[in-house]
């Protein structure tokens, strides 16, 4: 009731005699629905209120307003009646009127509660109907309830993407017999096939290397080392120097003592590049005894800016080379620019990567077994097998008696090792424990990054993710594949070292795509024994399996393995080797809606985001020729 009605009632009640008060039935000032447990489910700060807000802000309902008016009239009429009036049979009449009044008041109170109860039921029904309409406009709410409710025979998915994973599992189960989208296993054939390899063409005289010797000790993993080797070859030609076969630095991260000759065919490397530069296996005896650091011949990564131009080396390194006869680059990585650089030097870089670096027979032979089992004992080698494993592909075919139809497989590179995760400065749903683990790892392996965090205000994890600077998690990767339309029966080869989070982090991937394999379960322990404790050689097997795949999907387009694999597939693939390269910034905008987005909408948006990265383009200026070999230096157009 309103404050005016409450005031009038209180005033009327006060006019009654003391003997009347014990028998007076009081009407409550206001019926508060919030007192009932059922009505507590709604509040302004938690969830929608139960019924219209007038029940919570003191407004009058229709029933309570009528009851107040009738009671006010009743008590008001009694107020107007003189107390001392003398009537015949007044006492008897007064007692009868008093009884009638009590009966009327009791009836009105009962009517009041009855009407309010009926209205409460109607409001509850209205809320249910409203929720039904809301679920049609935002179906994610109802979907979340459905997919997270445990039921017999259905897997319950937890974590950040639990709802979306359940929707993906449902979609894959329903679409087992549906045909996959045509472009999953295809490139845009016509524009892609217009390019052919031609980095093997030369248009210069051999370099005699008279200005001295260049030594390179490459850091990082096998892929960073491969880039360093190609840069060293170009640098030797630029400075007219003799290249000593590169060495690989031992890394506390990779913990691999493998050297160049343990991974690549040394003799082929020297012979193939002989028309370009002079390569030797060791320094001459007269230079071996020199203390290179003492004489100022050691050049470290910190001395050379990233992607330095050729002019830097001509100005700063050539004088040292001419004076000391030898320069040793320690930790030499991505230290040579892609542009501007002379045409023939750029072509030499491509020639080294795509032609001069061939894996040793031990790796090729084991990789041939791996490819054979991935293709389910196919009668023919894959399109790129010859370039990757050489004669071992043909030898495996001859040894087989049971020839079957080739089985397609998708290779997925999960760049989610702890070094990548820690260096990204992103968060991946592991809470405080995850943060402590990654910070401890940074302090040991990335001390410069740890110090930078103390002095600079770095972007927040949320900002990094929105900008596409975080690697995709295994959960995000499997959602991408499911949205693209890969069938549940798809054979997926997973490449990568130890995934951060272990097997539990791969649970969603193995659940949605049970036909998942790795080199560890395709090859026997005896076949893997020669590679034990040699992470770079194991990574070479992954490189071959990913490059030869019918389709290749990456989760981080900035990783060296993904860049080298996709470039190799472009160079030798003839427009028939599709690569799925996600736009992580656009995917981040989609994934952030994981609690509300409908699966159909999710599919459409993911497909659009990935489709836009599959167009055929020439190498953008200053971008890697290893990743984008479609340029006049590396490939030639046929049209």
Image (tube, rainbow, N blue to C red):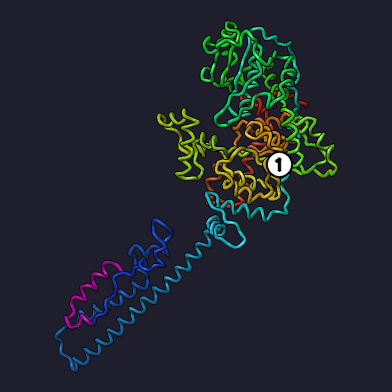
Residue farthest along the top direction in this orientation: 323
Tag 1 secondary structure: loop
Q: Where is residue 536 drawn, in percent x and y?
A: 64, 31
Residue 42, compared with residue 102, is above or below; it is above
Query: Which residue is tagged 1?
Result: 524
Q: Please give the name of the residue rendered at 34% of the width and 82% of the height, measured from the top-left corner.
A: 107
Q: Magenta span has 5?
A: yes
Q: Main secondary structure of the magenta part?
A: helix
**Outermost left residue:** 84
Residue in view at x 21 percent, y 76 percent: 13
Q: Quadrant of residue 77?
A: bottom left
Specify whether residue 552 is painted magenta. Answer: no
Which residue is rendered at x = 53% and y = 48% of the image?
593
Q: Is residue 68 left or right of residue 561?
A: left
Q: Nearer the viewer, residue 216 or 224?
A: 216
Q: Which residues are magenta?
A: 1-22
Residue 192 percent location from the top left of the image: 73, 32
Q: Would you identify the image quadrant in which residue 633 lies?
A: top right
Count of numbered circles in the view: 1
Q: Is 368 or 581 nearer to us in this picture? A: 368
Residue at (39, 64) in percent of width and height:
40
The answer to whether one can see residue 202 in this image is: yes
Looking at the image, can residue 611 be seen? Answer: no
Crowd rating for badge 1 (residues with CA inside 10 Å; few <14, some 14–19, many 20+): few
Quadrant assignment for the N terminus: bottom left
Say which of 137 and 2 sits in front: 137
Residue 616 x %, y %: 69, 32
């Amino acid at each position: 009731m309103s404050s005016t009605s409450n005031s009038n009632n209180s005033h009327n009640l006060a006019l009654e005699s003391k003997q009347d008060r014990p028998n007076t039935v009081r009407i409550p000032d206001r019926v508060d629905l919030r007192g009932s447990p059922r009505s507590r489910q709604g509040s302004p700060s938690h969830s929608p209120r139960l019924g219209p807000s007038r029940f919570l802000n003191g407004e009058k309902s229709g029933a309570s307003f009528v009851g107040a008016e009738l009671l006010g009239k009743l008590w008001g009429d009694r107020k107007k009646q003189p107390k001392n009036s003398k009537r015949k049979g007044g006492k008897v009449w007064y007692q009868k009127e008093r009884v009638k009044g009590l009966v009327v008041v009791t009836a009105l109170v009962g009517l009041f509660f009855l009407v309010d109860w009926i209205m409460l039921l109607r409001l509850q029904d209205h809320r249910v109907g409203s929720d039904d309409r809301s679920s049609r406009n935002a179906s994610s709410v109802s979907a979340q309830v459905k997919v997270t409710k445990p039921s017999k025979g259905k897997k319950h998915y937890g974590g950040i993407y639990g709802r979306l994973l359940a929707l993906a599992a449902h979609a894959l189960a329903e679409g087992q017999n549906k045909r996959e989208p045509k472009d999953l296993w295809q490139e845009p054939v016509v524009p892609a096939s217009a390019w052919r390899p031609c980095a093997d063409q030369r248009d210069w005289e051999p370099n005699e290397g008279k200005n001295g010797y260049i030594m390179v000790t490459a850091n990082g993993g096998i892929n960073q080392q491969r880039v360093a080797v190609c840069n060293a070859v170009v640098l030797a030609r630029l400075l007219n120097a003799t290249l000593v076969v590169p060495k690989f630095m031992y890394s506390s991260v990779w913990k691999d003592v493998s050297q160049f000759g343990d991974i690549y065919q040394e003799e082929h490397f020297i012979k193939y590049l002989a028309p370009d530069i002079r390569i030797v296996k060791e320094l001459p005896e007269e230079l071996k005894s020199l203390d290179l650091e003492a004489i100022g011949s050691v050049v470290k990564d910190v001395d050379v800016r990233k992607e330095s131009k050729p002019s830097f080396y001509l100005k700063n390194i050539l004088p040292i080379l001419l004076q000391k006869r030898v320069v040793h680059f320690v930790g030499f990585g991505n230290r040579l620019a892609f542009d501007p650089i002379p045409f023939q030097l750029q072509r030499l870089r491509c020639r080294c990567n795509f032609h001069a670096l061939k894996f040793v027979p031990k790796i090729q032979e084991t990789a041939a077994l791996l490819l054979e089992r991935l293709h389910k004992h196919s009668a023919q080698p894959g399109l790129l097998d010859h370039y990757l494993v050489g004669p071992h592909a043909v030898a495996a075919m001859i040894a087989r008696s049971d020839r079957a139809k080739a089985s397609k497989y998708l290779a997925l590179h999960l760049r989610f090792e702890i070094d990548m995760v820690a260096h990204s400065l992103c968060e991946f749903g592991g809470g405080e424990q995850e943060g402590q683990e990654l910070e401890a790892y940074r302090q040991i392996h990335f001390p410069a990054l740890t110090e930078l965090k103390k002095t600079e205000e770095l972007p927040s994890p949320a900002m990094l993710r929105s900008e596409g600077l975080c690697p995709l998690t295994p959960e995000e990767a499997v959602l991408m594949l499911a949205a693209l339309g890969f069938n549940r029966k798809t054979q997926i080869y997973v490449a990568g070292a130890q995934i951060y989070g272990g097997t539990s982090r791969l649970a969603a991937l193995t659940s949605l795509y049970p036909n998942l394999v790795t080199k560890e379960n395709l090859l026997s322990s005896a076949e893997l024994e020669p590679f034990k404790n040699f992470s770079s050689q194991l990574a070479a097997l992954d490189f071959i399996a990913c490059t030869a795949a019918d389709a290749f999907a990456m989760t981080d387009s900035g990783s060296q393995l993904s860049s080298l694999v996709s470039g190799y597939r472009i160079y030798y693939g003839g427009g028939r080797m599709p690569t799925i390269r996600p736009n992580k910034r656009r995917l981040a905008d989609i994934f952030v809606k994981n609690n509300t987005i409908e699966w159909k909408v999710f599919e459409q948006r993911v497909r659009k985001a990935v489709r836009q990265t599959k167009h055929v383009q020439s190498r953008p200026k200053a971008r890697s020729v290893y990743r984008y070999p479609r340029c006049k230096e590396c490939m030639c157009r046929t049209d």
